[in-house]
Image (cartoon, rainbow, N blue to C red):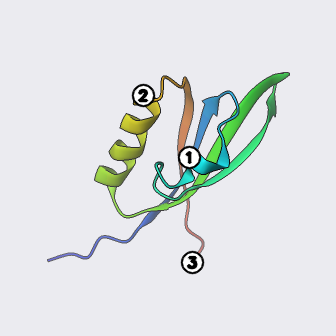
Amino acid sequence: MKTVEPLRYEIRVRGHLDVGHSEWLGNLELRTGFRRDRPVTVLSGSLADQSALHGVLTMIQAMGVTLLEVLQLEELD
């Protein structure tokens, strides 16, 4: 059986999320900023698998937050 390595993701959402949401969102790092003069939050870090990614995306949807972008980051060898 093949072992699945955690993958790194960067997820952008509209608005500024409170750092307290990190635990709900897979313990991803939250950074707030602006994009085109609009508030955004960037969530970044490793998730165990695609199921974990879907769980984070479901929580974002349940919070009523607008998803802007999801990127899978390349691992450096």
Q: Position of residue 22 (x, y in %)?
A: 56, 52
Residue name at image x 51 percent, y 59 percent: 27
Secondary structure at numbered mark 3: loop
Residue name at image x 47 percent, y 29 percent: 63
| Inter-mark Cα distance, 1 to 3 | 31 Å
Label drawn at residue 21: 1
Using residue 11 as the reference point, say whether residue 33 is left or right of it: right
Q: Position of residue 24 (x, y in %)?
A: 46, 49
Label drawn at residue 33: none
Q: What is the three-letter code of the residue carrying label 3? A: Asp
| Inter-mark Cα distance, 1 to 2 | 13 Å
Answer with mark 3 or mark 2, whichever residue precedes in sequence. Answer: 2
Contact, CB < 8 Å: mark 1 with mark 3?
A: no
**Front tag of 3 and 2:** 2
Secondary structure at numbered mark 1: helix
Task: State the residue position of label 2.
Answer: 61
Task: Examine the rendered structure and indicate whether residue 13 appears above or below residue 18.
Answer: above
Residue name at image x 65 percent, y 37 percent: 17
Q: What is the three-letter code of the residue carrying label 2? A: Gln
The quarter in which the C terminus is drawn is bottom right
Task: State the residue position of label 3.
Answer: 77
Q: How many residues crowd mark 3 within 10 Å: few (<14), some (14–19), many (20+)?
A: few
Q: How many residues crowd mark 1 within 10 Å: few (<14), some (14–19), many (20+)?
A: some
Contact, CB < 8 Å: mark 3 with mark 2?
A: no
Residue sitting at the far left: 1
Q: Position of residue 54 (x, y in %)?
A: 34, 43
| Inter-mark Cα distance, 3 to 2 | 34 Å
**Front tag of 1 and 2:** 1
Residue name at image x 66 percent, y 42 percent: 18
Answer with mark 1 or mark 3, whichever residue precedes in sequence. Answer: 1
Task: Examine the rendered structure and indicate whether residue 54 appears above or below residue 23.
Answer: above
